[in-house]
Image: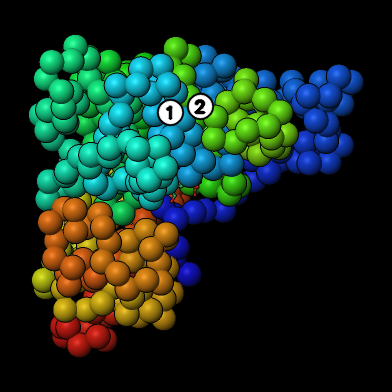
Amino acid sequence: MIFLDAAATGPVRREAIEAMWPYLTGEFGNPSSHHGLGESAAAALRQAREGVGAVLGVLPGEIIFTAGGTEADNLAVKGIALARRAADPARRRVLVSAVEHPAVLESADYLARFHGFRVDIIPVDADGLVDPEVFASMLATSEPTALSSDVAVASVMYANNEVGTVQPVRQLAALARAAGVPFHTDAVQAAGWLPLDVKDLGVDALSISGHKIGAPKGVGALYLRSRVAAEPVVHGGGQERGSRSGTENVAFAVALATALELAEAHRAGAAERVAALRETFIAEVLDRVPGALLTGHRVQRLPSIASFCFPGTSGESVLLELERRSVICSSGSACAAGSDEASPVLTAMGLGTEVAQTAVRFSFPRDVTGEELSQAADAVVGSVAALGMLQPD
Ligand code: PLP
């Protein structure tokens, strides 16, 4: 099997399992307990927080462990918007890009439906990019007489999960800061591939997820700048400094820190190597499959994602043909898998629904080889041919 669906998930790294094992067994304490077992768990949690903070270049106290990327996104978008408006009732607007993950889009929609926010969708161009000028104009208040922006939070992802386009996050964050608007970025797909130095990015909040980088599913983290307030989404015993209640998942936090540190240590080398393989794969598919259309930005894209439309096919049938040839990938994002609906990401980029329904995403694990991608390219040619779209070469 050639697994090219790494943007959906991946296996847990052995190092992460070994690091978390003691906290699932002998060292099983509750970090809030005032005895040796609890203190040992609290120490492990502290160390994990320091580890994640160090990779992001932030204070450990600015890291909130969550049950995944979805929860981190929810806390950022809902939590910051609600806290900001509580402090300043004029802040009634939320800006999110058209290509965000549902975790961000649905959080914004919830704010509109239950809290009366106005949600403005930041458009993207044909490559999936947000235009900083358009963003700047949307940050400006809708009431020209007001002194400050009426936006409570803006959220634009670092890298897209379907087409891999990398947004100009530094520029967007600087514009938001100048307008006094808290800026969140979903870095779930960027982690392990792109620099995560928060000070350099200039963002106020950033989400990551464990299972995309070799930690288990069901753990993630939100970086929240110390001066930015967020109303909790999960209420209870006040863990995570009141930001996220619930007995901390010490073992998974340890696994997340271990996986993130390892991903960061090998990031530059992996990104360069895999980007070169991606280029060869893209060139081969475009060359050998007439009509194949690369989606996403040609160069400003994740090293790990090559996404295409194969007009005249259906994405789902290409997937089945590929799986028969032992190549595992997906038609857009895993969230939309199984549905034959056109991806909102692709339609936001201006593709017609018919073409968007033919999308196939190949996303590469860090250890992918050139040999595997060459076999995968053959399988793509064979699959599209089997569907009657071209003669095999
Ligand atoms: N954001 C992006 C860009 C993603 O790709 C994903 C997962 O596919 C998520 C958020 C959600 O993360 P999780 O699966 O940890 O909830």
Image quadrant where residue 167 sits: top left
Taking the spot 25% from the left edge, 23% from the top edge, the residue there is 150
Q: Which mark is residue 153?
A: none
Taking the spot 17% from the left edge, 72% from the top edge, the residue there is 354
Q: Amino acid at mark 1?
A: Leu
Image quadrant where residue 313 sits: bottom left
Q: Position of residue 296 (x, y in %)?
A: 20, 51
Q: Which residue is mark 2?
A: 231
Q: Which residue is mark 1?
A: 82
Q: Position of residue 152 (x, y in %)?
A: 33, 26
* Visual colour scheme: rainbow
User: As drawn, which residue projects farthest toward the right?
Assistant: 35
Horizontal side of residue 255 vs 173, given as left or right: right
* 79 or 157: nearer the viewer: 79
Dot 2 falls on a residue whose secondary structure is: loop
Horizontal side of residue 151 vs 222, given as left or right: left
N-terminal-most mark, 1 or 2: 1
